[in-house]
Amino acid sequence: MWYIIFGVLTIIALYGLWLLFKKAGKQGWEAIVPFYREYVMAQLVARPTWWVILLLIPIVNIFIFYGLYLDLIKAFGKKRFWENAAAVLIPFIVLPMWGRDPGVKYLGQPNTEEFKKKYPYKKSVTREWADAIIFATVAASLIRGFLIEAYMIPTGSMERSLLVGDFLFVSKLNYGPRIPNTPLAFPFAHHTMPITGGKAYSELIHIPYKRLPGFEVIERNDVVVFNYPMEADAPFNRPVDKRENYIKRAVAISGDVVEMKNAKLIVNGIPGFGSSDVQSAYLIYTDGTGLNPQRLVDKRYDYVQGMAEPYVLYVTDEEIKDVKSWTNVKQVIPFENTESSFPHAEEYGWNFHNFGPLTVPKKGDVVKLNTQNLPLYNRLITVYEGNTLEQKTDGIYLNGVKADSYTIQMDYYWMMGDNRDNSLDSREFGFVPVDHVVGKALFTWLSWDKDGTFLSKIRWNRIFRGIH
């Protein structure tokens, strides 16, 4: 339905542009031919015609088009703020209106000195500030939405690959930027209004999932920012692009077989991602003197605060060797994480340290619909892909029709934190759909250590450090 409405409004706007082109002494049809239209615009407003080449560059082409477009509006004497805003927001109304108005005439090329002298126009201070603020807001929103966005790591789920206080840039271009599902939103707010609270977006317009072409596909072990899938549920009920942002590692991609045995990750039958930065949990017993909290802070060891023995530490293999060497430490036992894992069904009995093997769904896969598979695919089929699924005495019904199989409509991923026993990840919420993927983590541009002092507050060795 939205496509039809959008198509009709586009045709009306092009009709208005056709009329304006004719007023400028051009052929009306020139207004509807992409690239050639912008070439003609450049001539009409005295901009370099080679700008048309820049229309081939994603995102840059948006600035070029609107630059030429607003210059063209000025060529017809439309310089006031509301006229520029209307030309951008409701072109399907104002362009035909101006095109049919005999009082609106082509005045010449607005970027020439002759035009500026003949039709002087001085903006008020208020207009200057309004233009600057609006341009900055639009430009920043486009960059944030389609190019690159800054994030801060708030939790230790990716320790020690990413540390609490790391500020990083996430590329939207690598996997292809998403078209916003909810384009009507308060600038720079994600899902909640600053200060006042409440929703920072409107669902009056909802655009189905679309992603522009990217430079690469998600590869196994990429560090990925994605929207938290469980916020589709109450009490949030948020659209995909307004769900909270999470960052994890895609340890398994579409079509991979993932499992854990005794806390060891296995992907496609071989050991999965592992590095010296991966952390695990250990139970620490002392001779009764306890662990010195300041010593743990000084070494930046992640631990559960406020607990009596046994102490729970989240550390790397190298760090646990250090802990074992402490004179008051008598016993170190690897923590056994028996917390229920996806799909949280008794018949599976999986936990965070032992689950699978489990195949990560891939677009086009056909899966059986039976009582055994239902816990694995129920949420995928109903919540993520928008179907109804009902189990009756005589079988399973898909969208009201009895079915014994289902064809997967999207690619999915298995996301896990490098802090294996202190991470809320796919072991809890299951598969992550491709439409939830925000972008690829590139590098940290700053890292702030809350436990540091003075200059050591900044982790200098992490500035402009790539993320692997």
Image: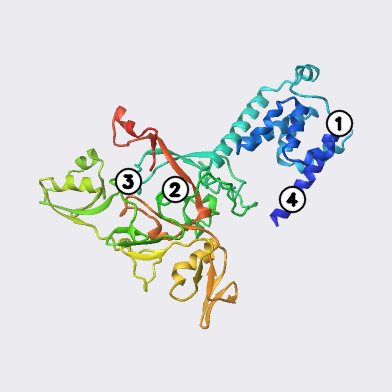
Q: Give the CA separation, mark 2 to mark 4.
A: 35 Å
Quarter of the C terminus within the rendering: top left
Q: Which residue is mark 2?
A: 224
Q: In the image, which disc is placed on residue 159?
A: 3
Of 213 and 308, the residue lying toward us: 213
Residue 444 visible in this rendered orientation of the protein: yes
Task: List the residue tagged with mark 1.
Answer: 25
Q: Marks 1 and 2, Cα distance to the nearest angstrom?
A: 52 Å
Give the residue displayed 68% in from the left and 35% down from the top.
65
Circle number at residue 7: 4
Instruction: Report if the CB atoms under discs 2 and 3 are less than 8 Å apart.
Output: no
- First in sequence, mark 3 or 1: give its number: 1
Residue type (three-letter) at the residue carrying disc 3? Glu
Nearer the observer, disc 3 or disc 1?
Answer: 1
Q: Amino acid at mark 1?
A: Gly
Q: Secondary structure at mark 2?
A: strand
Say which of 426 and 457 sits in front.
426
